[in-house]
Amino acid sequence: MNIKDHLSKVNEYFSPKVIGEVNDIYVKVAKIMGEDIPWHNHANEDEAFFILEGELLFEEEGKDAFIMRKGDFYVVKRGVNHRVSSENECHIMLIENKSTAHTGEVESAITKSVEDQLK
């Protein structure tokens, strides 16, 4: 599997695509640009972020915002409000439970169902 090949098929920002699965975990890729992701959390699941290309601003409630760069890895713990954004296109890999809702309980214009992420 070539991750760049999978990323070349991602045509929308903030629209993760499942590229693999391990037990009850999905491995996803996404492109981020802009500030459209709302503050949200995942009540029952941790979420892992790995930066493939570019820079990602990571905001987490109760902590100072920080920039993630290519090669950086971060796990946001369940129940913690967070959001991400990027001034320029950023490519990320997400590692999440299959039950993880894209934007938690928050519905927004960019929210994608698991079914959409499997296409």
Image (cartoon, grey):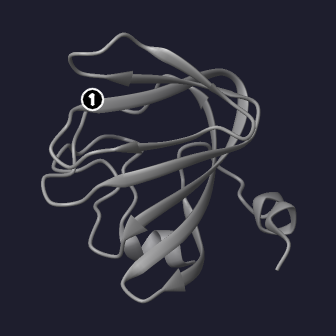
Q: Does 2 sit left or right of 60 as displayed?
A: right
Judge whether 98 appears above or below 90 on screen: below
**Residue ranking furthest to the top:** 64
Q: Quadrant of the N terminus?
A: bottom right
Whole-percent x, y for residue 37 in the image: 40, 33
Q: Looking at the rendering, which quadrant does residue 4 occupy?
A: bottom right
Q: Residue at x 52, y 47 (%)?
A: 49
Q: How many marks?
A: 1
- 109 or 95: nearer the viewer: 95
Q: Label 1, on which residue?
A: 39
Residue at screen point 75% across, 36% down = 70
User: Could you tell me the amino acid type at mark 1?
Assistant: Trp
Is residue 112 depicted above or below 63 in this figure?
Answer: below
Q: Nearer the viewer, residue 86 or 109?
A: 86
- Mark 1 neighbour density, 10 Å: few (under 14) some (14–19) many (20 or more): some
Residue 21 locus on image (x, y percent): 52, 83
Residue at 78% over, 64% down? 9
Looking at the picture, tell me which residue is in the foreground, 93 or 112.
93
Q: Position of residue 74 (x, y in %)?
A: 48, 41
Image x and y of residue 42, in percent:
21, 51
Instruction: Say whether residue 103 is left or right of residue 93.
Output: left
Q: Residue at x 57, y 78 (%)?
A: 119
Above or below residue 32? Residue 7 is below
Q: Is residue 79 left or right of residue 96?
A: left
Q: Determine the image quadrant of residue 102.
A: bottom left
Q: Secondary structure at mark 1?
A: loop
